[in-house]
């Protein structure tokens, strides 16, 4: 048995997928690695291009099926940004929200608890009990802000 601490995210995904009856082939493992390690949301085509570097025989269908399976198990979710709604990114461990750089796509998760208090208050004011929300922040990451400033 592998010890839990040393498992990478893609190894954890691999275990969950095989428990769900999904056979892990070499290209599929490559897809898991790429998506789990990405610091920004990726489109299926971007994943496809990266996987093909080492697995030239892989088909786009395999990419879509693997993404679908990961979505079913709530391991990745679709991210809406820059008019590109097809991108997927790993899900957070806990209830967290995404902050995404509009320039390079670099993405981080943050806790939304403070603002979520306000959502409840908004609901109360309007006579609703708030049971859910969509929250995603967009901005410019440090690296992209640096580039802008140096351009002057
Ligand atoms: Zn950026
Ligand atoms: Zn939230």
Image (spheres, rainbow, N blue to C red):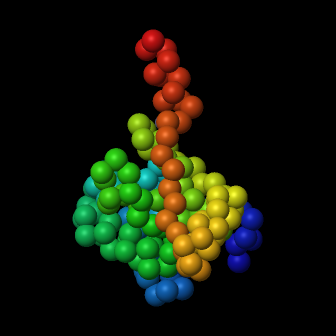
Judging depth in this view, the residue of 47 and 79 nearest the camera is 79
Tell me how many marks there are.
0
Residue 45: tell me if it is visible. Answer: yes
Question: Residue 11 location, x and y as percent?
Answer: 58, 67
Residue at 30 percent of width and 51 percent of height: 83
Rendered-image quadrant of the C terminus: top left
Q: Is residue 9 above or below residue 144?
A: below
Residue at 71 percent of width and 77 percent of height: 1
Report the residue that reaches farthest toward the top: 152
Q: Quadrant of residue 120?
A: bottom right
Residue at 38 percent of width and 57 percent of height: 80
Q: Is residue 122 above or below residue 22?
A: above
Judging depth in this view, the residue of 80 and 46 nearest the camera is 80
Residue 55: tell me if it is visible. Answer: no
Residue at 32 percent of width and 58 percent of height: 85
Question: Residue 40 location, x and y as percent?
Answer: 47, 49
Question: Residue 92 location, x and y as percent?
Answer: 59, 64
Question: Residue 94 location, x and y as percent?
Answer: 65, 68
Judging depth in this view, the residue of 150 and 133 nearest the camera is 133
Q: Is residue 37 above or below residue 64?
A: above
């Amino acid at each position: 048995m592998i010890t839990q601490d040393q498992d990478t995210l893609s190894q954890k995904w691999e275990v969950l997928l095989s428990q769900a009856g999904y056979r892990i082939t070499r290209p599929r493992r490559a897809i898991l690695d790429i998506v789990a390690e990405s610091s920004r949301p990726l489109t299926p085509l971007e994943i496809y291009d990266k996987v093909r570097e080492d697995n030239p025989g892989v088909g786009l269908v395999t990419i879509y099926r693997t993404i679908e399976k990961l979505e079913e198990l709530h391991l990745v979710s679709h991210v809406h940004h820059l008019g590109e709604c097809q991108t997927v990114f790993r899900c957070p461990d806990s209830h967290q929200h995404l902050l995404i750089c509009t320039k390079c796509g670099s993405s981080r998760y943050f806790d939304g608890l403070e603002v979520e208090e306000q959502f409840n208050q908004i609901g109360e004011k309007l006579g609703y009990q708030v049971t859910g929300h969509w929250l995603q922040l967009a901005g410019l990451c440090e690296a992209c802000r640096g580039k802008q400033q140096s351009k002057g």
